[in-house]
Image (spheres, rainbow, N blue to C red):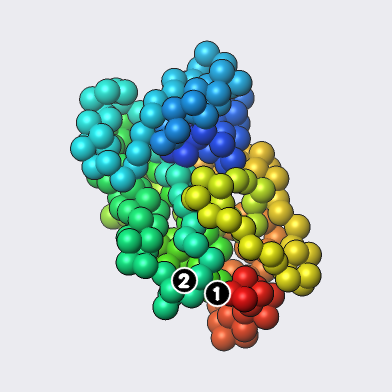
Amino acid sequence: MKLNGKVVLVTGAGSGMGRELTFELVKRGASVIATDIHLATVEETATLAGKAVTAIALDVTDSKAVAALPAKVGPIDCLINNAGIIQPFVPIKDLTMEQAQKVMDVNFYGPLSLIKAFLPTLLARPEAHILNVSSMGAYAPVPGQSVYGASKAAVKLLTEGLRSELMDTKVGVTIVFPGAVATNITTNSGIAMPEVSADASKFKQLSADVAAKMMVDAIEKNKARITVGKDATMMDRLSRINPVFAANLIYKQMKSLLG
């Protein structure tokens, strides 16, 4: 689906990949409804991107606000579920149920609510698309991020199931697995980033603008899935060939996060 002249709704557009996605969409001639829980940051995105962007404050965990959004913004041609948070860098035994619930609410139930809200509109369009952002953590377990990984694995299977359900429609569906991308997700999640081991720090982060371009390309080419970054691609392959070895490799690199 070519995005020129289309209307795209992006969540988490106040910074990072969401902001870069907005910029890339505008470059390709799309009109963007940029949403974020922080109104000031998404308004800044709109100002930087230009007149083709409408900024709206949205908490994706507010089911009533999400349900009311289609009537508020009108028909859209594409939904990008980008908003997400990580958990505190602690093992499951030290993670509270409230912290775990918050991660699931933002990362899984948020996209699900938006899909439910906009799917009737998308099905009525001549062509449409849904892109959901998962994570390398959905298939490569990271110590101290087990619930985050579980939330992104849930997004993976939700998206794959949705694609199968919509296969005979004109709504395309893409799942994205980013690796290490330079964003401020830790700050947005209210998490202090702990010191990383020397080995782990060698992983080079992909810039958010490059990641955004890859994601928008995937929409226009109607790709079912993409990995973003060399680390995500490598771990995707390795996790299929030898998942235990892949998990052990990440543990050795990341174990310093757990102290």
Residue 230 located left or right of residue 6:
right
Instruction: Identify the residue at horizontal 27%, vertical 23% (top origin).
Output: 72
Residues at circles 2 and 1 in contact by the CB criterion of under 8 Å: yes
Instruction: Identify the residue at horizontal 43%, vertical 74% (top origin).
Output: 94
Q: At which x and y percent is residue 52?
A: 50, 17
22 up-or-down from 257: above or below: above
Q: At which x and y percent is residue 53?
A: 49, 20
Q: Which residue is mark 1?
A: 143
Q: Nearer the viewer, residue 190 or 144?
A: 190
Q: Which residue is mark 2?
A: 146
Q: Amino acid at mark 1?
A: Pro
Q: Amino acid at mark 2?
A: Ser
**Dot 2: few (<14), some (14–19), or many (≥20) neighbours within 10 Å?**
many
Would you say residue 29 is visible in this rendering?
no
Would you say residue 198 is visible in this rendering?
yes
Location of the C terminus (image quadrant): bottom right
